[in-house]
Image (cartoon, grey):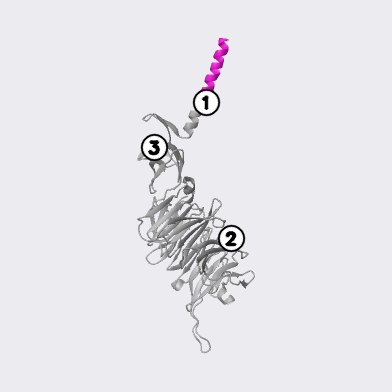
Amino acid sequence: MLRRILIVFGYLFLTFLVVGLTIVLVAYGNDYRYDWATHKIIQNGHVIIDSLPNNVNVSADNRYLNKKTPYQAAYTVGKHTFGINLSGYYPWQKTVPIVAGQVTLLQYVILVPKRPAETVLDSRTTIVAQSMSKDHRHLAYITGGSQAALYTLDLGNPHPVRLYTPKAAIPATPTTAAVPAEVLTGVTWSDDASHLLVSATVGGQPEELLASASGGTPMNLTQQYGFSFSGIQFSASNWQQLYWIAPDGLRKLDLGAQTVSDIIASNAIQFWMTPDRVLYAQQTPTGTELWSVDSNDHQQELIEAMAHSSSYAVAYASFLGQDELAVVPSSNGTGTLYSGIFGSTPTATTIAHGVQNASFSPDGHLVAFSAPAEVVVYDLNQSELMDKLVDYQITGQPGSLDSLSWFDNYHLLENRGGQLYWSEFDGGNSVKLDAIAGGFPAYSSSDTKSIFEFKQLSTSVHIDQVTIRH
């Protein structure tokens, strides 16, 4: 009998021991620990750090850890400062809040080399316009002066190709009038990088040309169809369908059918492309409305009343299946984010004031509202997780912001007064790179390993490929 009782108690002890150890392990896995100072069980937060390159020394709160990236550990609740240092690279440091029971991810760290490898892809006296294809594999640029021409670069195998040379002036003859020289002023790619729209003037009169990326004589759309086509744009889904605002309203040019549509929307003042629709602002007696039209000319009202303005900066993205639209009226500089814009109940969130432009990160989880002296980056992902507005104010930066582009989903490239800067989405770990021409942006390569920049030298402009990571 005693033996049976001892066996039962033994089993009970082992059961309680297993359950207790399980509870301890689960608590440890969730970053719980016993605080001997307060004699309480508290929950820590967790941090995960990864870097490119990796296997780099990590410090925390000014203490060398003898640990390398990738690195993860539990930390007490509050702000902690982490650092990464590698010879030949700019040091990285960031202070982040650690929240109980949450994981802080710092997996976007890119260490910038102090002397990155640079490759000169082309050199020209002047460059007056440029455009990067949507896939970041093709660059087009217009040179000025005696070298005036349209060039393209296939960035996978960079070799400049002269795609088109503007027509020279033709002097008058006893029977014909003089014809002024053609001057190229702008260029844009179709989304599939198969064609380019080239803006030009002849004797001060605007013309639009359609060029094939594979070469050949461009089509003069203005002469072919009898419209100036000022501001014409490719639709995102089909390069043969183009839109522009004529004096009487928004119209569509269908190159496949060789037709010009009737007026799609009268009193349209501006339009923008999304993957499957065209958005346009339309003035009405009661104010300015935002509408969309698809390839079948089906129209939908999106915003009944926008702030009245002569122009708007608009950016579109899709994030976690939700359509997002950032809008900035030039009249008041208020940056607003509209979520679920194509649904029945879109929501509007005011993000920033005194801004001029808007730009989404490639994956849509960040949107930057910018002005010459300030950038406000709104974090859609963290705002959703924290159930509150999470944004990052970037102020006090050198120079005046001329252009902003995204290197990847976490890093910005800024042209500030002719100087190129690299930084993280919140302005942290900023690095001064090269002098850059005019107000041109810099671009990332399709594999986000390099930067393509228009480097300003004393007597020329270099198109450079700057390798940031391998």
Pick the front one: 227 or 87:
227
Looking at the picture, which amino acid does disc 2 mark?
Asp
Pick the front one: 55 or 306:
306
Mark 3 / mark 2, whichever is N-terminal: 3
Q: Secondary structure at mark 1?
A: helix
Pick the front one: 115 or 219:
219
Q: Quadrant of residue 329?
A: bottom left
The x and y percentages for residue 175 are 53, 89
Looking at the picture, which amino acid does disc 3 mark?
Leu
Marks 2 and 1 sit apart, C-alpha to C-alpha, by: 56 Å
Q: Residue furthest right?
A: 257
The x and y percentages for residue 155 are 51, 59
- Which numbered disc, 3 or 2, marks the residue closer to the eye? 2
Say whether residue 30 is visible. yes
Q: Residue furthest top?
A: 1
Q: Quadrant of residue 63?
A: top left
371 relative position to 161: left or right:
left
Mark 3 / mark 1, whichever is N-terminal: 1
The x and y percentages for residue 21 are 50, 26
Q: Which residue is mark 1?
A: 19
Q: Which residue is mark 2?
A: 276
What residue range appears in magenta?
1-22
Marks 3 and 2 sit apart, C-alpha to C-alpha, by: 51 Å
Q: Secondary structure at mark 2?
A: loop
Q: Residue furthest bottom?
A: 174
Q: Residue at x 63, y 69 (%)?
A: 256
Q: Does 16 appear in magenta?
A: yes
Mark 2 / mark 1, whichever is N-terminal: 1
Q: Which residue is mark 3?
A: 65
Q: Main secondary structure of the magenta part?
A: helix
